[in-house]
Every structure is written in structure tokens, then in C-alpha cells.
Amino acid sequence: MISFAANLCRLELSCFHGGRRSIATVISGNITSKLVRERLRKEVEEMSFSGFRPGLVVLQVGDRDDSNLYISTKLKVAAQIGIEAKHVRLPTTATQEEVLQHITLVNQNPSVHGLIVQLPLDSVNSINTELVTNAVSPEKDVDGISCENAGKLSRGDLADCFLPCTPNGCMELIRQTGVSVAGKHAVVIGRSKIVGAPMHDLLLWNHATVTTCHSKTRDLPEQVAKAEILVVGAGRADMVRGEWVKEGAIVIDCGINHVPDETKPSGKRVVGDVHYASAYQRAGFITPVPGGVGPMTVAMLMENTVKSARRFLQRELSRR
Ligand code: NAP
Ligand code: LUD
């Protein structure tokens, strides 16, 4: 764990203070991820004897603007840490067979320790995403979304798998608050394979009592009101209103939504799934968007890649 409080922007003491309720402490993903990246840079330096470097491949199908942005950030951060990262981009015309062939090649390449398939797949052909993500060798699945890694996480074998980057990043941000997760009532909104479902599992095995909500959940505000820890990954701009939030709760917002904004040169801006201005008035701790979960997703991918490279070195040493 990184030193607690280094990344907390404590504008006022949270919760009740002298009878007066005050505003939230902001948990910065930019600062926390910087600490993680700096630690990883040193670790990579230490393992870089005789030219060894951790290797990462990011496989993309198509040309989505958002994927291009996320991948360029991943490549830049990898380079800063000393990870040899390669971007493989297949055209939108790529077939499922071609994607699987590329995955097999990377699986067999001993200089690559991590492989992620950036989602969603942007193809004119019908490609089974589940089949593709499961083709990644579990020991290189630094995204932590193959059935094998997800299964281990769901059964609580956390030390024996790669933890998915976004939920793992959320856990790191929750740890930054110094609040113990054990015994807390946590509510997760969303049940996707990369955010909601693994977030539920991680909170559960960190001993929270967890409720997971989705599009069929009745009375979302009622569920949210019970959350001492709230993690939102729904993809709905400003959906969670501050009035729903329990006083003093930890609010982690995974959402990345583009909304029109005429005051910006691009004509749009990024907002989360939580209505920040109102939630800020009630939460104890809150993550901003941008600068919250996003940078942690990237940092945790690097952490998994370095972990995979270390495991590779250990296997090599034990063979000799
Ligand atoms: P997803 O696959 O579309 O899943 C969204 C989930 O939210 C689904 O489980 C869906 O329920 C649920 N949901 C949708 N509308 C809802 C509503 N009105 N009430 C309650 N639940 C609702 O999306 P995702 O990949 O998990 O991503 C979610 C958000 O996080 C997006 O904004 C995405 O851009 C962002 N994201 C951010 C990061 C990061 O690093 N910051 C990483 C990944 C994703 P059903 O299952 O019933 O459909
Ligand atoms: N697929 C991801 N698809 C999309 N935000 C990311 C992401 C960086 N297989 C697979 O990387 O983990 C993944 N594995 N994802 N995502 C989203 C998701 C995937 C999201 C945000 C960021 C990666 C990021 O750097 C910045 C921030 O929040 O401050 C900038 C946000 C902006 O758009 O300006």
C-alpha cells in the first residue's frame, strides 16, 4: 500500500465537525497513480539486469477514438516505467480467426509478459469477445478478465490471479482513505466483466457486505443510500445524485462519459456517473472525473505487467 493521505486533498474535515456537516475529501487518482508508477519504475530498474525488460502487448481491433486515447496513455506510461510496450492494431475488417492467430503468436512469445485486448472490439465482422479474451494465456492476462483469473477472484484466491485493473485501482483509492473495508456495506452499480462484477468480488473478499445493482435494480436511490462505500460503473452521465448518497460515504466514480459543452474548444467534456457537485456536499471521500479511477486503471495494468515479468523470471531461475 502507498503512504496514506499523500494524495488526499483535504479541503475540509469530512463528515460532521463541530455540529457542521462539511464537504468531501477528494481522492486523487493522478497523485496515487504517480506514486505507483514511481515505485514500479524503481522495481523495473532493479530487474533490468542483462537488458531484461518487462514486455506488454496491447492488441486493438479497429480505430475507436476513446481506445486510441487510452492506448496512447498506456504506451506512454509503460515507456516511463521501463516496460517494453507494443501496440498491435488490426483493421476493422479483421476476422475472429485473425485476432485469435495474433493472440496465439503473443502467447508463444517469451519476451512478452502481458497481453491485453482493448475493448470494445471495433470490427465489421462478428467477433466473440468472450472467446477472444479467453484465448489470452492466463499467465499473461494482465487485464485479469479471462475465465481462469475471474474464477479465482470470485472464489477469493486473490493472491493467485491477476486482478482486473479498474477494480484493483478502485481498491487502491479506497485504501488511500484509511477507512477499513471489513464489515462495511458496499454498493456497486454495474455488473460488467471489467468493472462491476470483479469490483463486487474484490470488495467481498476484502470483507465488505456487498450489494450489486444493475439496470433492472428497483429503486436505485434506496440502495445507494445504504452504501458506506459506493462504486459506480454504469456509463450514465451524472446518474447518481448527491441527495442519494449517505453522509460521509466513500464514493468511487468509474464513469467516463462525454457530454456536450460549448465552452470547450472540443465542444464536449468528460463527466463521471456521479453528479460530482452534489455528491461532493455529502460524501466523506470522492474521486474526481477525470483524474480519479482512469489513471489508476493504467497504473494497475503496469503493476500486473511487472508482476507477470517477475513471475517469468522466477520460473526461468527455478528451471536452471
Ligand atoms: P457496461 O459494460 O456498459 O456495463 C454497465 C453496467 O451498468 C451494466 O451492468 C448495466 O446493467 C449497468 N447499468 C446501466 N445503466 C444502469 C442504470 N440506469 N441503473 C443501474 N445500472 C445500470 O460498461 P462498463 O464497461 O462496465 O463501463 C461502465 C462505465 O465505466 C463507462 O462509463 C466506462 O467508460 C467506464 N469505465 C471506466 C474505466 C476507467 O478506468 N475509469 C474503466 C472501464 C470502464 P445491465 O448489466 O443490467 O445491463
Ligand atoms: N479494455 C479497458 N476498455 C475501456 N482516463 C481502459 C480507460 C484510461 N480490455 C480492456 O483501459 O482496462 C481496460 N481493459 N479500459 N479504460 C476504459 C476501459 C478496456 C479509461 C480511462 C483512462 C483507460 C484514462 O486515462 C483519464 C482520466 O480519467 O483522468 C482521461 C479521461 C479522458 O477521457 O480525458
Image (spheres, helix red, strand yellow):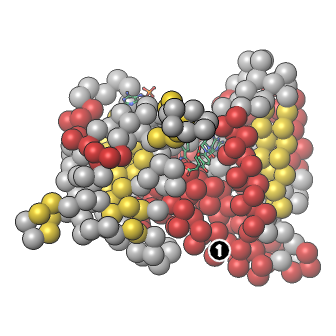
Q: Residue at x 75, y 74 (%)?
A: 44
Q: What element does badge 1 sit on? A: helix
Q: Residue at x 53, y 67 (%)?
A: 31
Is any part of residue 281 visible from this angle? yes
Ligand 2 quadrant in view: top right
Residue lying at the far left of the rendered structure: 19
- Judge from the rendering whether residue 117 lies leftward or rightward of residue 163; answer left or right: right
Say which amino acid is labelled 1. Answer: Glu
Residue indicated by mark 1: 38
- Judge from the rendering whether residue 9 lies leftward or rightward of residue 66; answer left or right: left
- Foreground: 44 or 236? 236
Residue lying at the far right of the rendered structure: 50
Residue lying at the far top of the rendered structure: 125
83 is higher (above) or lower (below) than 186: below
Is any part of residue 308 visible from this angle? no
Q: Residue at x 7, y 66 (%)?
A: 19
